[in-house]
Amino acid sequence: MNTKTLKLSAVLALALAGWCGAAAAAGTADPAAMVAKLDALRRPSAANLKMGFTLTTTENDAQDTYRYTGLIRRDAGTLVLAEDGDQRGQKYLYTPGGYWLYAPRTRRPMRLTPLQTLRGQASIGDISRLNLADDYSAAFAAQGEAKVDDQECYVLTLTAKSPEASYASITLYVAKADQAPVQADLLAATGRKLKTLKFGGLKKVGGQNLLTTLTYIDAVNPNKRTVQQIHAVEASSTPAAMFQPQALALEN
């Protein structure tokens, strides 16, 4: 057997190994079900709710924490209100029609993209768009399994099916033991990793098990990170009319 044939055989063997890994995983778990579980752990089931959370940024050994309120209507969108710091009074709105920012003393809201920074490594799309199943199709990656943070995980590839999706694709790591999410690598269309998202803090809030600690880590400098900590979730009666760009100038 010549050198060229040996190289081809090696390539085919690697491809077969990857296929076998994905096939083995596929025999025991359902990617769509795992994404649905992640969505359920990120978003409370109530159709109209109020969520209190903080964003803590760390960079160059400096750490700052800021408070936010999230108003969420399943049929309308998400409205994030900045409560303190340099963003106090600013409003970030997500609806199926797009993203907007309203700042005090401005005449009209400004249109945003989902990757627009909310604070540190957390973008407005990260915080306000909470249903991955709507935006991505899921399948096992060629490397069907991996070890992350000492946990044996399934590896999924999530591919954007909606132009409004924040990322072109996501590599999602799900614990084999209980199919709980462990980590997500958030990727640009070029395949470049933009940031890593760590999932944690699973606890009962407002009568429902939720992931209460989400850590966004910069892909280039892992010392730059932003931690979202959810502190309170309660039912709300925010009217649908508030989730309109023209309503952002109104007092809540």
Image (tube, rainbow, N blue to C red):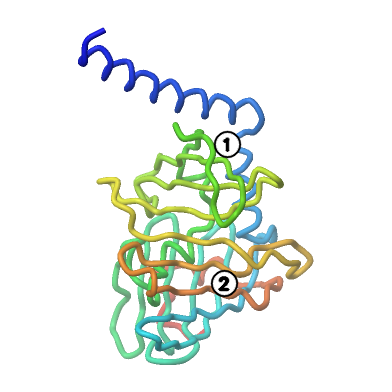
Nearest to the observer: residue 64 or residue 46: 64
Estimate the spatial distance between the alpha carbons at disc 1 and disc 2, rounded to whole Å. 30 Å
Q: Residue at x 32, y 75 (%)?
A: 109
Q: Secondary structure at mark 1?
A: helix
> Residue 29 lies in what quarter of the image?
top right
Q: Residue at x 43, y 69 (%)?
A: 93
- 147 with respect to 246 (left or right): right
Task: Indicate the position of residue 88 as horizontal and vertical percent values.
Answer: 43, 89
Three-letter amino acid code of the residue under disc 2? Leu
Most extreme residue toward the right, as rendered?
Answer: 207
Q: Choose the circle earlier in sequence order: 1 or 2.
A: 1
Nearest to the observer: residue 59 or residue 239: 59
> Which mark, by number, is residue 31?
1
> Residue 97 lies in what quarter of the image?
bottom left
Task: Indicate the position of residue 137 as horizontal and vertical percent values.
Answer: 47, 37
Q: Residue at x 35, y 18 (%)?
A: 12
Task: Indicate the position of residue 209 as horizontal and vertical percent values.
Answer: 73, 61
Nearest to the observer: residue 210 or residue 28: 28
Three-letter amino acid code of the residue under disc 1? Pro
> Residue 48 lies in what quarter of the image?
bottom right
Task: Indicate the position of residue 136 as horizontal and vertical percent values.
Answer: 46, 42
Q: Secondary structure at mark 2?
A: strand
**Location of the N terminus (image quadrant):** top left
> Around disc 2, counting alpha carbons within 10 Å, would you say few (fewer than 14), some (14 to 19), or many (20 or more)?
many
Residue topped by disc 2:
71
